[in-house]
Image (tube, grey):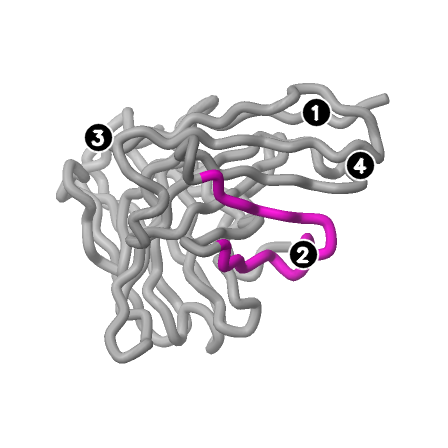
């Protein structure tokens, strides 16, 4: 059971905007920045967003992140077929003294 | 460009103590700038942070695995390793090594990130 909660699936059509939520608590999201990772089948996760809304070099600006209280979300605008992947949120948890991950959201582009 | 590459035994029998190694290129693990991290993923499941090591051998472990895990540095080879004792089928997973960075101010972590990751190595526990 993950300490961060994500919906198992999400879907949208090309060109649409989709938002993936991530819910946590006061010891994790409430205190620390949230990262997001994108993972394609058979591949390693790749950093997509960190510190809630910072994109690493090379990340596409169609992706954006936000945080409010103990929840965070990843938004993808102008959805494309190659955005179909699994998306994971993660953050440091002060009570666990370690990183915690969400269970992942499988995004389907219809 | 920093690259990480895992290596491991592949197939292990229950109760064995496998050791996985991560070889780092393009960065020195003794630079003191980053934590070196292990994360695993069971088939069809999510990601689980195992632990991390810092220069000098300072470690943090996932409390659920702490009694069975040792992460250590080999600066002479620019490698770090994961040793997992008393493995069971539940430890079957793809194991990733990764570099974790953070920015602190006055002892408080201002931001952190996990990047890059290795490609992962599958460890199967089976008799």
CA neighbours of label 3 inside 10 A, class few (<14), some (14 to 19), many (20+): few
Mark positioned earlier in the residue sequence (2 or 3): 3
Left or right for B33, reference B67: left
Q: Residues within 10 Å of mark 4 (few under 14, many from 20)?
A: some
Q: Are marks 3 and 4 in contact (CB under 8 Å)?
A: no
Residue highlighted by disc 2: B66
Q: Secondary structure at mark 3?
A: loop
The answer to which quarter of the image holds residue B18 is: top right
| Residue A10: image location, x then y, percent | 42, 42
Q: Chain of mark 3?
A: B
Label 4 marks which chain's residue? B
Task: Determine which residue is flagged by label 1.
Answer: B124
Rendered position, B26 above or below B110 = above
Whether discs 2 and 1 lie on one chain: the answer is yes
Question: Which residue is identified by label 3?
Answer: B1
Q: In the rendered image, which residue does mark 4 sit on?
A: B88
Cα distance between the residues tagged 4 and 2: 15 Å
Q: Which residues are magenta?
A: B57-74
CB under 8 Å between callouts 2 and 1?
A: no
Image spot of residue A31 (x, y percent): 38, 75
Instruction: Give how far apart the Cα atoms at labels 1 and 3 are.
Output: 31 Å
Q: Nearer the viewer, mark 1 or mark 3?
A: 3
User: Which residue: 52% across, 43% down?
Assistant: B39
Question: How far is the residue under mark 2 from the one under mark 3?
Answer: 32 Å
Q: Camera-side residue: A21 or A96?
A: A96
Dot 1: chain letter: B
The one of A37 and B108 positioned closer to us in this rendering: B108
Q: Nearer the viewer, mark 2 or mark 1?
A: 2
Element on which disc 2 rests: helix
The quarter in which the N terminus of chain A is drawn is: bottom right
Horizontally, residue A12 falls left or right of residue B39, namely left
Check if residue B123 falls in the magenta segment. no
């Amino acid at each position: 059971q993950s300490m961060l909660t994500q919906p198992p699936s999400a879907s949208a059509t090309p060109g649409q905007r989709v938002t993936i939520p991530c819910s946590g608590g006061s010891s994790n999201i409430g205190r620390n920045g949230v990262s997001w990772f994108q993972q394609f089948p058979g591949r390693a996760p790749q950093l997509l967003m960190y510190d809630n809304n910072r994109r690493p070099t090379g990340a596409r600006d169609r992706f954006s992140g936000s945080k409010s209280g103990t929840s965070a979300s990843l938004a993808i605008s102008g959805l494309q077929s190659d955005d179909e992947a699994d998306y994971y949120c993660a953050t440091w948890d002060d009570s666990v003294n370690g990183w915690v991950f969400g269970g992942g959201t499988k995004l389907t582009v219809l | 460009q920093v690259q990480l590459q895992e290596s491991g035994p592949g197939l292990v029998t229950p109760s064995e103590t496998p050791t996985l190694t991560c070889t780092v290129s393009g960065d020195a693990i003794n630079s003191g700038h980053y934590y070196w991290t292990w994360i695993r993923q069971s088939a069809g499941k999510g990601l689980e942070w195992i632990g991390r090591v810092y220069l000098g051998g300072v470690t943090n472990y996932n409390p659920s695995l702490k009694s069975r895990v040792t992460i250590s540095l080999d600066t002479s080879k620019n490698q770090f390793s994961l040793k997992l004792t008393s493995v069971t089928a539940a430890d079957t997973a793809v194991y990733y090594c990764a570099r974790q960075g953070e920015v602190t101010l006055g002892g408080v972590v201002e931001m952190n990130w996990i990047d890059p990751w290795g490609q992962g190595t599958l460890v199967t526990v089976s008799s």
